[in-house]
Amino acid sequence: MKKIYISLFLGVFSLGLFGQGYYQIPSVNAGMNPGNLNNDPEQPEGFLTANSTGYSNVLPSSTADAWSTVQTIPFSFNFNGAAETQYHVSSSGVVTFGATTPTTTPGFTPSLLPAATIPPKSICAWGVNLTGANDAVVSKTFGTAPNRQHWIIWASASSTALGAGWTYWGIVMEEGTDNIYIVDMRSYSQGGGNVAIAAGIQVDGSTAYTVAGSPALTSQNTATGGSQSDALDNSYYQFVYGTQPQYDMTATGTSVPQYYDINNAPFTLDVDLRNLGTAAVTSFDLNYSINGGAAVTAPVTGSLATFASGNFNHPTAWTPSASGSYTIELWASNINGNADENMTNDRISTSVTVVDTAATRQTLMEVFTSSTCGPCAPGNANMDQNVVPNVSNYTIVKYQQDFPGNGDPYVTPTAVNRRGYYGINSIPRMEIDGQWDENAASLTTGVFNGFQAVPAFMHMTFNASSISTNQVSVDFDINVLADYPAGTYVVQTAIVEKKTTGNVATNGETEFFYVMMDMLPDENGEVITGLTKDNTINITRSADLSGTFIEDLWDLKVVVWVENTQTKEVMNSAWADVIQLVSVDENELPTASIFPNPANDVLTIQLEDEQEVSVKIVDLSGKTVFAKDFGLTSTEKVATSNFAPGVYMVQVIADGHMSSERVVISH
């Protein structure tokens, strides 16, 4: 599980002098959406309507500020302590409660709250417009009763400061808690500027609760170029009705993995904690419970100012009694010797599986690049020259893309669609096991090793990977070592060429490595089931590669991996060389006897007469373990005592013709 760190960012309030009101909890660079209910892609209204369910179009593109028709809140909700059932939305980033449409609009230029142009009972992310062709306001309700969130999203909105760029902001109402969130989702600046937003709540003409920086609050994620189309770069500002507690610690995340290898026990359990109270925390107890059992409690010393976060390890390590599934709860208590005043947010729960066998992880690096992309060249060079030679147990797939300009000469629709799967709209971009989304120029051996340290609980074994003429055939087994949780898993198969030179364009690169040529059956992969412990799943694939950009049929590898399409996480991967089977007339095949089979220490190759003979032996991962030209001979022996037990392909080339035979080595 990915750690969650929330930065310290103190809000400033402008409010009335008496009566109960709101307090604010800022979560800048939260790396998630509030409550983690909304995990939809952050895309224009057209994309959301076509690819995601449940969205309603509230306001279309418009050059003028305008109010929407009346909208209905899908659950009971209180604003400032009073029940509300309906609202209107403005093009400029304002939600106001009530059934009656306001008579004036706020306009596109924000000012400090409270503002005369903002109606009473309003929530503001004020300062955007819908003047672009793709701009719209959409709404959707996430979650299930009684814990739903109603989202209102300014999707691909415009701002004068962004030029031809765009920005996404959300206003969220939460069932049960009556919490309000203003979410900074995604922004892209064409000219280097940033949005200017007035964010907050306006109760009436004299009372408002405002996010610090308003009316010039900037988006926190323009540094990514807006390419992050999920919540990993999101910030949000939470408004809670009531009085802020003095002592309130919440658990926000944990690095406890999904799987543990029992052979590595005991395990250190950690938790990310945040202080939401007004008092600085100097001491507390840290607790964990296994499967609802008795709490394991230990004192911890540490300093957390209001709204500060920290990661803490429990002093008592956990040793599971046996392999199996466990539920772990972690929480803090006894804050500065006092009880936590808000028990609703204390605990975080995570499920883990303890297994008795683990596999070596082969970390998958997927690179989105182009020979017309200037910044792609140093990214590829860093990966190929500085990182790959210094790491092991990896697989690589590079997808050539269709921009800048016409893009790489070897671009394919499959490569472009794979980019869309990750929501990538700028290159260079790299995914490591579907979880690290950065420029390959930022890749280090430390980053790679961090992903490779994640345990894997499946491995792939190749039975065959060959090509005859242009027809490729792949046969492999997925060996499952643990029960995988429910989800949608697909197996992917890609054919890559180890080196290409025919797609040289404008960025100075002259050689390109592990370029994707085809995916079998396509970039969507194939859904697999049966991911239960000790199960073996056989996968066979075949395709005609005659329509691809392959330069050398002797220079191919097949890469296979299993991924969770909901989290994008890659469970494990593997690759093997594609063996070229020479297509000749059956009468021309060399007649070779290979014995014994199974073999122990020596393998004998015998032909009917003397011929020019070469022998190559390849294991099922595609690795060549023996290769030798014997010259003119009829009988040769190959020592196999140092070969690992297993199945091998023995290729005999005699007088330019080749035949292959599977041989088992057993000691």
Image (cartoon, grey):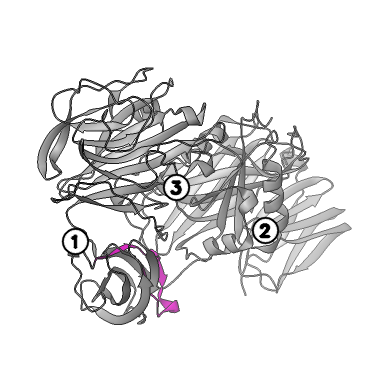
Asked if residue 52 can be seen in this view, the reply is: no
- Please rate how many residues cluster around mark 1, counting C-alpha atoms within 10 Å: few if below 14, some from 14 to 19, many from 20: few
What amino acid is labelled 1 in the image?
Answer: Thr
The residue tagged 1 is 344
Q: Secondary structure under badge 3?
A: helix
At x 61%, y 30%, the residue is 402
The alpha-carbon separation of the residues under discs 1 and 3 comes to: 26 Å
**In the figure, 558 relative to 265: above or below?**
above
**In the figure, 127 relative to 566: above or below?**
above
Q: Which mark is residue 233?
A: 3
Q: How many discs mark residues in the rendered view?
A: 3
| Pointers 1 and 3 in contact (C-beta within 8 Å) | no
Q: Is residue 548 left or right of residue 245?
A: right
The alpha-carbon separation of the residues under discs 1 and 2 comes to: 46 Å
- State the residue in front, 356 or 29: 29
The residue tagged 2 is 387
User: Could you say where residue 22 lies in the image, as x and y percent from the top left?
Assistant: 21, 50
Q: Is residue 41 magenta?
A: no
Quarter of the image for residue 392 reads: bottom right
**In the figure, 108 relative to 460: above or below?**
above
Task: State which tag comes first along the sequence, 1 or 2.
Answer: 1
Task: State which tag comes first along the sequence, 1 or 3.
Answer: 3
Which region shows up in magenta?
A: 248-271
Q: Is residue 167 left or right of residue 653?
A: left
At x 37%, y 26%, the residue is 108
The alpha-carbon separation of the residues under discs 2 and 3 comes to: 26 Å
- State the residue in front, 585 or 567: 567
